[in-house]
Image (cartoon, rainbow, N blue to C red):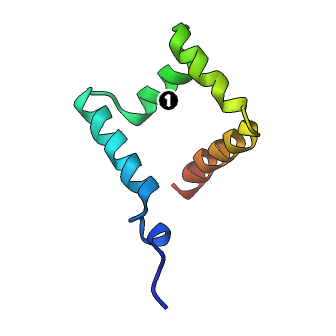
Amino acid sequence: MGKTKKETGDDADSRKALEICKNLQALKMTPKEFMITFLTSKNSDLASRRRLWTIDNGHVRSLHLVRCIRDRFEDT
């Protein structure tokens, strides 16, 4: 049986992520620079968007993000 689109990286979320990466590149910003700025900026619009992370069990997804970052470090 063949692999799913998610397994091959050809799913909608992967395509969206690639589009975001292209936009960041056009802005001359790395994904790390974006994340650091997003998480630490005092800008009220960014702070408001950060608060959305806690809606509807957002903390669970946030912890998943941290685990994914940790796993990337452990893989290298």
Instruction: Say which residue appears at 48% left-offset and 20% top-offset.
Output: 37
Could you say where residue 50 lies in the image, as x and y percent from the top left?
A: 61, 23
Between 45 and 73, the one lying in front of the other is: 45
Residue 62 is left or right of residue 73, and the answer is: right
Residue 50 is left or right of residue 2, and the answer is: right
* Number of numbered tags placed on the structure image: 1
Could you say where residue 75 lies in the image, as x and y percent from the top left?
A: 55, 58
Classify mark 1: residues with Cα within 10 Å, few (<14), some (14-19) or many (20+). few
Between 13 and 7, the one lying in front of the other is: 13
Indicate the secondary structure of the residue bearing disc 1. helix
Instruction: Say which residue appears at 61% left-offset and 53% top-offset.
Output: 71
Where residue 57 sits, quadrant-wise, is top right
Instruction: Say which residue appears at 37% left-offset and 54% top-offset.
Output: 15
Most distant residue in the left direction: 26
Most distant residue in the front direction: 56
Between 27 and 48, the one lying in front of the other is: 48
Between 69 and 20, the one lying in front of the other is: 20
Could you say where residue 61 lies in the image, as x and y percent from the top left?
A: 68, 44
Residue 21 is left or right of residue 65, and the answer is: left
Where residue 44 sits, quadrant-wise, is top right
Where residue 30 sits, quadrant-wise, is top left
Does 23 appear above or below 67? above
Does 20 appear above or below 72? above
Could you say where residue 21 lies in the image, as x and y percent from the top left?
A: 34, 41
Instruction: Say which residue appears at 41% left-offset and 35% top-offset.
Output: 31
Q: What residue type is labelled 1?
A: Met
Most distant residue in the bottom direction: 1
Does 62 appear above or below 73? above
- The residue at which mark 1 appears reads as 35
